[in-house]
Image: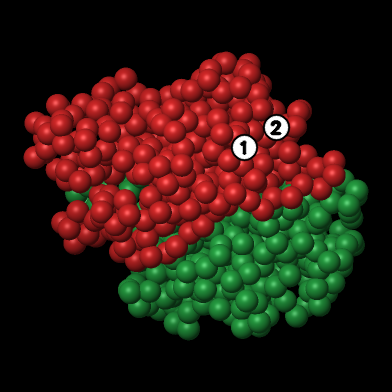
Chain colours: A red, B green
């Protein structure tokens, strides 16, 4: 548990931004592509549409840059003052080199350093934790934390188990030293390597370098064993969510919102139920976006920014490939 | 520049470990594979051999695990006490999900969370910075920072511009709160997105998803424009190395060692010359390992651990794909 020393800096999210492409791939569109129905998808996942970045010349960096531009425009942030840019993604533009330096250069963050962080659907949460560390340590003052994924670039649109789930999007949060008592309060993160069997993209790494054989097997597409991921996700997200509230002596009535990774509406509802939370305390935008992987949490903060008030207690929770999962308690630091 | 508040925790490297495979791929071996000579390679790069993880069933995680096991064996560290595991790599086992959770599980770090960090040859340095932040902030007490790459999995052994350079290896450092006055003193990092044109692996990301066409073009292999990378590397590494010494009021005689990324002996020598450092202050092991990407810095610390004494001032410097680069000043914290 994070214990702050007297006088220590607290990191806080001070601005957010987001971007989703205009093109909507609806359940009705998918009915024409794979053996599925709108009713089946909605009842099993809560998803009605997902946004797709159609232009093949535009990659994850485009989503990240648009989200950052949204934040910069809203806040009039001078990008030259940014110290550090972290991009959480599992769909970098290139496999080498990392995408964050390109994004940083494109948005004018010419005094920053930048890197990519890979923790799948927990990526944005982990990247926030990294930023919170560098700020609370006094190392930096302005860190951009981006979550962006062009999932359509690794989804097989003949595989009905994945193509109905994932969408493209990008979101970003600015972290700075808090100028009030609010900000990053606590975090409780876990991982378990057994997850790589259930959610993966087998080819292109050092275990199965890309070859004619991996291409023929379709190993360059995302694979998900939905049943097992569902099972682990519910129990893991509920565990960390409950634990972080318990160790911070919070009851459900103290919490303003649960901000959960948007993998599947049923996972979210089951998690909230196990945490004893009412429906209206759970933020959701999955119906129109699907699962945008690292982008779900910043997109939620972006979409619901107007509902967040200074001092509101939020639990951010995520579960994803790896497995990686965790929960963070934050107090919202601005109106 | 990092300024510490009174009473603030300082992060320190408290142990290191390393591993390279036994199989040596010598210049003479390469003479039989591509149009090159031992003399040409040695004079241009300083490399005589590189280590190769031959077994196709063993990927980057194997190198990382062996390095961690070496550290754990030397120090009798209880892996259950590890809070966080960061793996810097550009050759994860799978493209999704990340490799760090698997490594953490395999070494018994069952209470840790884990993620991958991608910043190419600067990856380990950036990961140390992340760990230093989390520790100095008081968030965690034991962070394993691993740099590991099975470069042979993405190198085209018909491309003489890259196959003579890269090798496989893994290294690791444990970071903890310092129990003396020594540790992580300062860091100065930069990135520039223009680097992605000069050093990349084009296919497998969201810009060029793997396809028959990318396979035919060989875009699943590493590409390097050696001349341009050389030019940027020397000026960038020398700039940050000089700047970090200047702003910490250090002259060359105060420095025990420069610990530079091992990309090319001529880059290292040119960097050291521009920094005004004598040859004996520059750590090198490139001749037997080649460029192991994220593993070069921890392998240097591992190989030269016996020469490092408490209080020694070291500058770690790296330059890599992205571009990403930087320098960190540390005072060695143990004998």
Percent position of residue A141, x then y: 72, 35
In the picture, the disc for residue A182 is: 2
Q: Which of the pair B208/B30 is nearer the observer?
A: B208
Q: Quadrant of the N terminus of chain B?
A: top right
Quadrant of res A16:
top right
Write the residue at 19% across / 62% down.
Answer: A213
Percent position of residue A143, x then y: 64, 35
Write the residue at 34% across / 24% down.
Answer: A21
Horizontally, residue A317 falls left or right of residue A154, namely right
N-terminal-most mark, 1 or 2: 2
Crowding at label 1, few (<14), some or many (≥20) Cα neighbours within 10 Å?
many
Q: Which of the pair B101/B36 is nearer the observer?
A: B101
Write the residue at 80% across / 67% down.
Answer: B332
Whether the residues at callouts 1 and 2 have beta carbons within 8 Å, the answer is: yes
Number of marks in the image? 2
The kind of secondary structure element at disc 2 is loop
Q: Mark 1 belongs to which subunit?
A: A
Residue that carries the numbered disc 1 in the rendered image: A330
């Amino acid at each position: 548990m994070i214990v702050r020393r007297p006088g220590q800096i607290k990191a806080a999210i001070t601005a957010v931004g987001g971007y989703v492409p205009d093109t909507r791939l609806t359940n009705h569109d998918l009915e024409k592509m794979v053996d599925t129905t709108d009713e089946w998808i909605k009842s099993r996942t809560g998803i009605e549409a997902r946004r797709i970045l159609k232009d093949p010349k535009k990659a994850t960096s485009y989503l990240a840059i648009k989200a950052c531009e949204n934040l910069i425009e809203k806040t009039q942030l001078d990008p030259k003052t940014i110290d550090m840019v972290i991009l959480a993604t599992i769909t970098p533009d290139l496999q080498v080199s990392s995408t964050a330096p390109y994004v940083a250069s494109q948005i004018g963050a010419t005094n920053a350093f930048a890197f990519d962080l890979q923790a799948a659907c927990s990526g944005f949460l982990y990247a926030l934790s990294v930023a919170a560390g560098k700020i609370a340590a006094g190392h930096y003052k302005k860190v951009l934390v981006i979550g962006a994924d062009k999932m359509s670039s690794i989804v097989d649109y003949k595989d009905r188990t994945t193509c109905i789930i994932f969408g493209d999007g990008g979101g970003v949060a600015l972290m700075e030293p808090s100028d009030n008592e609010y900000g990053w309060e606590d975090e409780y993160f876990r991982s378990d390597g057994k997850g790589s069997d259930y959610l993966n993209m087998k080819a292109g790494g050092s275990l199965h370098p890309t070859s004619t054989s991996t291409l023929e097997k379709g190993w360059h597409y995302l694979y998900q064993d939905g049943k097992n991921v569902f099972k682990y996700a519910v129990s893991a997200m509920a565990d960390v969510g409950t634990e972080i509230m318990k160790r911070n002596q919070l009851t459900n009535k103290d919490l303003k919102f649960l901000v959960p990774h948007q993998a599947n509406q049923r996972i979210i509802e089951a998690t909230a139920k196990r945490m004893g939370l009412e429906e209206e305390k759970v933020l959701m935008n999955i119906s129109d976006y699907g699962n945008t992987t690292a982008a779900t949490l910043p997109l939620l903060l972006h979409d619901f920014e107007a509902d967040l008030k200074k001092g509101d207690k939020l639990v951010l929770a995520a579960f994803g490939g790896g497995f990686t999962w965790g929960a963070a308690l934050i107090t919202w630091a601005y109106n």
